[in-house]
Image (cartoon, rainbow, N blue to C red):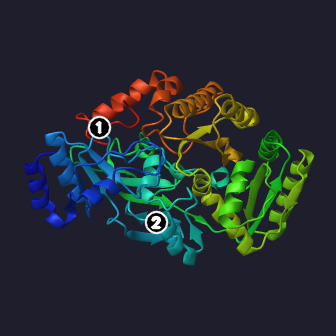
Amino acid sequence: MRDTDLQELRALLGPERVLTGESELLIHARDESHHPEHKPDAVIYPQSAEEISQILRFANERKIPVTAWGAGTSLEANPVPIYGGIVLDLSRMNRILAIYPEDLQAVVQPGVLHTELNQKLSKYGLFFPPDPGAPATLGGMVANNAAGIQAIKYGATKDYVLALEVVLANGEILRVGNRAMRTSSGYNLVGLFVGSEGTLGIFTEITLRLVGIPPAVSAATAAFPALEQAAQAVVQIVQSGLDPAALELLDPDCIRAINYLKNLKLPQQPTLFLEFRGHALEVVRDELCLAQEICQQNGCTHFSSALGHEERNKLWEARHHLAYAAAALNPGKRAIAVDVAVPISHFPSMVAFARHKLAEYNVNGPVFGHAGDGNFHVGIFYNPEDPDEKARAQAANEAIVFRAIELGGTATGEHGVGVGKIKFMRTEHGASYDLMRQIKKLLDPNGILNPGKIFE
């Protein structure tokens, strides 16, 4: 960007919202991923769709890159400004515009945190289910189609977005979708924008579907002698017709990490975290009992249920903080976040394959994930100052991802493509990858919106 560009933007928005200080640029230069940082030329804090429209029209005419920024909690450099330019920090567009309890809907701006929304909704007995664990903004969750620990029961963000207000690269403000719970009217443009990672437009208003908070909750942990036994129990629980709200798999490295961070005393064995929700405690207990039987048939050595509310919350808090706990046990190292998902029948073999590849390439990292829907992660740690170890970590990552795609799965179950998954897109999507590029070219002909993501 030229000095004259910055002068014009400051005249448009005021100098207090067009920032170029070094600390401000560094804050917006990296997310939670292992990918290198890239500083923007300026960070702008818009407060309305009209302002974003003006900024994009200005940037499009001058072919200046524009990258949207939520909370910076993503794991594939999704909001990192690879080519500099403008970062649009949407944190000041953080109002809950409307709540319609009778329709189970809410309308929000993109800077609202999902935790804040659920706090407001709790008095109505409602909640927005997707929960990535990190304090993510709803705009970022829609952009990445975030999921989380409750995806097995409630699905991902895409299942809750009814309508969007989007600003296109040329500054046009577009509304897609409506507040009806069902529609067969035309192309699903809402679905096109959800998961597009800010490459097609900037969200300025989001209409969400909500669900009621079930009154009955029961959680449990199940420890197994071997990871493959725990994975097989996951498959059988899903195939049995049970409806867990969460079904998480953690290997011994994960348990060791969260025991250390949260002062827990869980057996350091492959472990499942289970939770069931419903409208009657008897039904929830019956489901948990059947899950216990399945776990024991697969060699479970320690099943702990009937957890108190405080203990249950501590358990899930530990699960949410797992990435930080694992990092604490690997000081000075970075981690490649593997994020594959496979058909549930292939889940046990895929987990075994991942462990084998870690051993083959002599790298380490915890295996964990949202096992109930076939989505799991491997945090492959490496020393960034050791080129050989970094190359081995990358080789293990590629082997795991290509194997998942070969089994009919995907390179990314919830983190998005960002920078790190681009190399797998052609293999996963084939000719449809070219169609995606054509759509990008149609909506953003100058390529100013989050360049370097999804496409090279």
State the separation of the CA atoms marked 2 and 1: 28 Å
**Given contact means CB atoms under 8 Å apart, are the residues at marks 2 and 1 in contact?**
no
Question: Which image quarter: residue 405?
Answer: top right
Question: Of the residues tagged 2 and 1, which is closer to the observer?
Answer: 1
- Under mark 2, the amino acid is Ala
Residue 402 located left or right of residue 228: left
Q: Is residue 327 left or right of residue 271?
A: left
Rendering coords of residue 295 (x, y %): 86, 50
For residue 247, say whether it is visible: no
Q: Identify the residue at image location x=46%, y=66%.
A: 106
Residue 227 placement (x, y as % from top left): 79, 42
Q: Quarter holding the N terminus?
A: top left
Q: Which residue appears at 33% of the width and 51% of the height? A: 68
Identified by mark 1, the residue type is Leu
**SS state under label 1:** helix
**Considering only vertical position in the picture, is 281 above or below 414?**
below
What residue do we see at 58% from left, 41% from top? 339
Vertically, is 177 above or below 98? above
Crowdedness of circle 1 by 10 Å Cα count: few (<14), some, many (20+)?
Answer: some
Name the residue furthest front. 385
Residue topped by disc 1: 443
How many discs appear?
2
**Residue 4: % across, % down:** 7, 50
Of residues 307 and 182, which is closer to you in this image? 307
Indicate which disc residue 106 carries: 2
Of labels 2 and 1, earlier in sequence is 2
Left or right, 167 with reference to 177:
left
| Image: 31 above or below 104 | above
Q: Position of residue 12 (x, y in %)?
A: 12, 60
Q: Quadrant of residue 284?
A: bottom right
128 or 417: nearer the viewer: 417
